[in-house]
Amino acid sequence: MPNSSAVRPDSAFLAVLEARSGESVSRCYQCRKCTNGCPLAFAMDIMPNQVMRMAQLGLRDELLRSKTIWICSACQTCTTRCPNDIDIAHLMDSLRQLSQESGVPPAEESILRFHESVLGSIYRHGRLFELGMVARYKLAARDPLGDAKLGWEMLKKGKLKFWPAGIQGKREVRAMFRKGRKG
């Protein structure tokens, strides 16, 4: 009887990931500069260089279920350090997208909620409206008053605005979102 916990590489996954991201994951030769510079490596279950190797090996399920792809803040440190010019931060974003499209539940649900709150705010207002975004995020996270004291202090100091700033081109921003959903 086969072992159900055995690793099952997906030989087509590397090609899919490279086509999706536009990044040549195959060029990674494990110098570890991405991992050594990552400010969030301490919180990751798989180091960035291990993500690269796992992608090369076709370990699709393990990658799409990892916390790392959600914890990555896309700060670009890994990308700027890569001697092969692989945009690893973009690759992490592609992995998040593939995870969502595959129906894999995010390993870090709160990060997905935050991401959706940020993008929803930009879609609605044409730019980020911090107070509205935080309110939506806190409601989605079922923690509406978790940072109320901090929020009040920021409001008093003028760091948060009660109303979103008006901008020109909201239609164009929304059109970019719609185009991104189709592509």
Image (cartoon, helix red, strand yellow):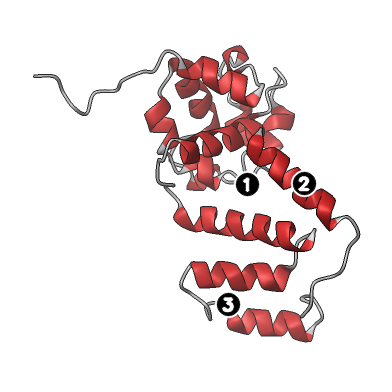
Instruction: Give the labeled residue for mark 1.
Output: 73
Figure quadrant of the C terminus: top right
**Which amino acid type corresponds to the residue marked 3 in the rendered image?**
Asp
Q: Is residue 27 left or right of residue 67?
A: right
Q: Nearer the viewer, mark 2 or mark 3?
A: 2
Instruction: Give the labeled residue for mark 3.
Output: 147
Q: Residue 169 versus residue 117: which sits nearer the camera?
A: 169
Figure quadrant of the N terminus: top left
Describe the element under mark 1 as helix, strand or loop. loop
At 48% across and 67% down in the image, what residue appears? 141
For residue 20, what is the image quadrant? Answer: top right
Describe the element under mark 3 as helix, strand or loop. loop
Q: Position of residue 28 (x, y in %)?
A: 59, 16
Q: Residue 46 versus residue 67: which sits nearer the camera?
A: 67
At 18% across and 27% down in the image, what residue appears? 4
Q: Nearer the viewer, mark 2 or mark 1?
A: 2
Q: Is residue 159 above or below residue 180?
A: below
Say if residue 52 shows up in the picture: yes
